[in-house]
Amino acid sequence: MTDSTSSSQRSVPRGVGTAVWTAVLILALVMGVIAAIIGIASLVPGLGPLSPAAARFAPTVAPISALVGLIVLVVGIIAVRRGQRRTGAVASMLGGAGAAANLAVVIVLVGAITSAGGSVNLFTATFGLSAIDAAAPDRQEVYEKTSSGDDLSVSVYEPAGQKDSAPTIMYVHGGGWIAGEPDASSSELRELADHGYLVVSVEYELATPDNPTWQSAPSQVACAATWIQGHADELGADMDRLAFWAESSGGNMVANTAGAAAQGAAESSCGGEVPVPDAVVADYPAFDVTGLYENAPAGPGAGTGTRIFATSFTGGTPEEYPKRYATVNSLTHLTDAAPPMLVMTAMRDDTITPADQLAWADSARDRGVDVRTVQIPFANHAYPQKAKNSLGSQGHLSIAENYLSERLR
């Protein structure tokens, strides 16, 4: 009786250990598949919906996926040594492929970022991801009202310990003119403030199918700029070191505002003279609204969504409203008087065709505008917005800050 009981007790740990190892091996196989798909689909375009989906997340998860791939590879090697040759070989291949492919993505991304003047902390990009909207502004102020009487606010992010006037960034969010809000990337705006910038993020009227905002929203952005100028002493804003920064559809409006202001022709909803910034930064910008409609990228839902952005903003198609499209297209407002611009293009963008963005930059240069372009490989639209401290987030912030440090001296 004693021998039987003792034998049964000894067999329990062995059974538990086998179950745990089996669970580890299954988990490794699943994670290996995921890491391999992310890495390979990021490297290889044209793999159906996998490639654009991977490009949306590669600048965020590639370092983590490379690490996961290495762990899966180790588990696979251990499995082979334990006699599970077939399963171990599969895990080893998946882990090796995932590690190698994602490491290649990391190397290329980091190379592109550093060559453009940016910098990346790989440890933070792997272990320090955080929410992109976790911060809060120091205060919010109403700067204007919509035509229906709703308040429009700016969110103000102040440099810590600010004593003198600070270089100032007016930030304008994207969202296809139909979505988005000023504090969606608050963690990045707080970092800019921590680096010594006064950041003022602008709310503007969003378009709906029944309320095109092609006139009102840009004039509200211009009004926000005049509001900053009028409250410069109170804000601690150095108007001799002013930049506009925006992403996607916001990039369209800041480029138009800056270009028109340089000619003394910017229209502000609250009147006053619109200040001319010393520089403009635009992430994956929607400069060409006609192209946004006509050259909608192929892919499930991509073209439909892109056309909704353009038609909601303008009220219809280019054929219906050619003058409206001509008004909102950014080239209309650019001359050699326009301030210098930094354009960062996601090279796997399935919302705003990268070729259109680069062609626009060439046309702007032909008009005498100082345009610097930076190409972010393997990245899709809104690549920095998945998490703070990601490769994409660190990359575009550091590239832009390096650019602004040269122009806001």
Image: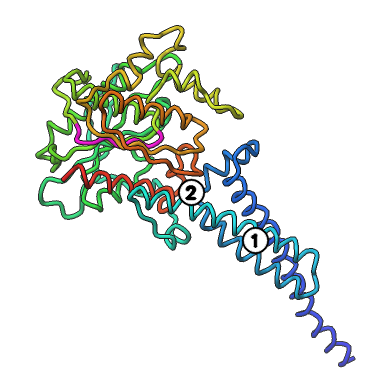
Q: Quadrant of the N terminus?
A: bottom right
Magenta stretch encompasses residue 62: no
Indicate which disc residue 372 carries: none
Q: Is residue 91 left or right of residue 58?
A: right
The local secondary structure at tag 1 comes to helix
Comparing 285 with 185, the one in front is: 285
Residue at horizontal 45 percent and vertical 7 percent from the top: 320
Give percent across and percent down for residue 32. 66, 57
Identify the mark at residue 59; answer none if there is no mark.
2
Horizontal arrangement in the rendering, residue 182 relative to residue 305 (left or right)? left
In the picture shown, does residue 19 fall above or below 337?
A: below
Label 2 residue SS: helix
Residue placed furthest toward the front: 366
Q: Amino acid at mark 1?
A: Gly
Magenta highlight on residue 279:
yes
Image location (x, y in percent) of residue 227:
17, 30
Image coordinates for residue 314, horizontal then vertical, percent: 40, 15
The three-letter code of the residue at mark 2 reads Pro
Q: Main secondary structure of the magenta part?
A: strand
In the picture shown, does residue 75 fall above or below 369? below
Considering only vertical position in the picture, is 67 above or below 305? below
Number of the label disc, if any, that sits on residue 96: 1
Query: Which residues are drawn in magenta?
Result: 277-284
